[in-house]
Amino acid sequence: MKHLLGMRFLEREEIEAILDQAEAFKEILERPIKKVPTLRGKSVANLFFEPSTRTKLSFEMAAKRLSADTVGISKTTSSVVKGEDLIDTVKNIKAMKTDCFVIRHASSGAPHMIARHLDCPVINAGDGTNEHPTQALLDCLTIKERFGDFKGLNVVVVGDILHSRVARSDLMALTKLGATCSVSGPATMLPPYVEEVLGAKRIYDIKEAVREADCIICLRIQRERLGDLPLFPSVREYASFFGIFPEVLEYAPPESVIMHPGPINRGVELDPGLADSDRSLILDQVTNGVAVRMAVLVMLLAQNN
Ligand code: CP
């Protein structure tokens, strides 16, 4: 594993190895002094050309917990706004002896293109509608912690599957690990490839979709990627048909849990009370994001430097 560009490139054993390493790192995050010298002397560049709260800060925190140095730029604070192209930007940052690049970009494939131009690890922190591999890894770790095993587990992903890089990475990772996956949402947002390529059943009725779900992963509508496409009549109608509210959850098994990659649009895809309830693993996901990103940084930097 030279880069982490997508779950499609990982074998089940590689996913399991990352999860095992992340579980070990969770212990460090519980210590009074949450720092180890594993990556002392290494430098990580976080290049976020799209907004982020969780991914950006948890990559930064993960690197710092491992004693690596971090630098970062965003689209608006980089010379990209002066017309510099992406490859020139990363080559200049690499010339400062950077050891690893974390890339978020609105264009699907941007981290893959960067990886072809650099001789150091590149981590995809979310590219367009393509993949978000570390989100899938932290989701898998959260599910593993709660349920122990993926075999026999039913996971439903609900919402704007068409534009969701999280859905694609989650479905690839979870099916490789042995879970049974389905998707639900407006028909216009459930592309045929989820069934034909990823093996996730499409279920249009939300009550039927949650009926056997151990785990319900809610997604927000990716407004920034919709453009003028009228994929559903109104937000209110979307919420009434596909929002996870108490009356929908009554159809789900009582021990089922709710997850969400964030950011949440409370009251649209998820009831505000449920987001904060005992059924919600949303903040566990965020906690696990740091451990998973520590594991990925160590595995890539140890193998490739
Ligand atoms: N889940 C996720 O990618 O959140 P951010 O956009 O805040 O990083």
Image (cartoon, rainbow, N blue to C red):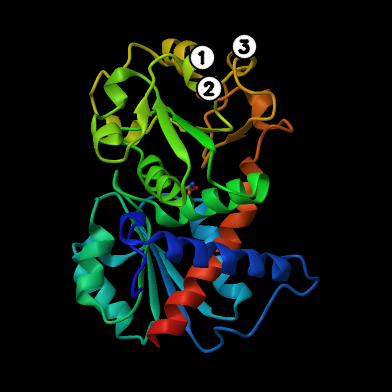
Residues 246 and 65: in front is 246
Circle 1 is placed at which residue position?
Answer: 207
Q: Residue at x 48, y 15 (%)?
A: 208
Q: Tell me if mark 3 has few (under 14), some (14-19) or many (20+) residues whose alpha carbon lies within 10 angstroms of its own.
A: few
Residue 132: image location, x then y, percent: 39, 51
Marker disc for residue 290: none
Kind of residue at disc 3:
Glu
Circle 3 is placed at which residue position?
Answer: 247
Marker disc for residue 210: 2
Q: Nearer the viewer, mark 3 or mark 2?
A: 2
Q: Residue at x 36, y 38 (%)?
A: 164
Whole-Å distance between the Cαs marked 1 and 2? Answer: 6 Å
Kind of residue at disc 2:
Val
Q: Tell me if mark 2 has few (under 14), some (14-19) or many (20+) residues whose alpha carbon lies within 10 angstroms of its own.
A: many
Residue 50: image location, x then y, percent: 36, 51
Q: Is mark 3 within 8 Å of ligand 1?
A: no
Check whether the beta carbons of the residues at disc 3 and disc 1 lie within 8 A of each other.
no
Query: In which quadrant of the rendered view does residue 257 lie?
Result: top right
Specify whether 176 is left or right of 5: right
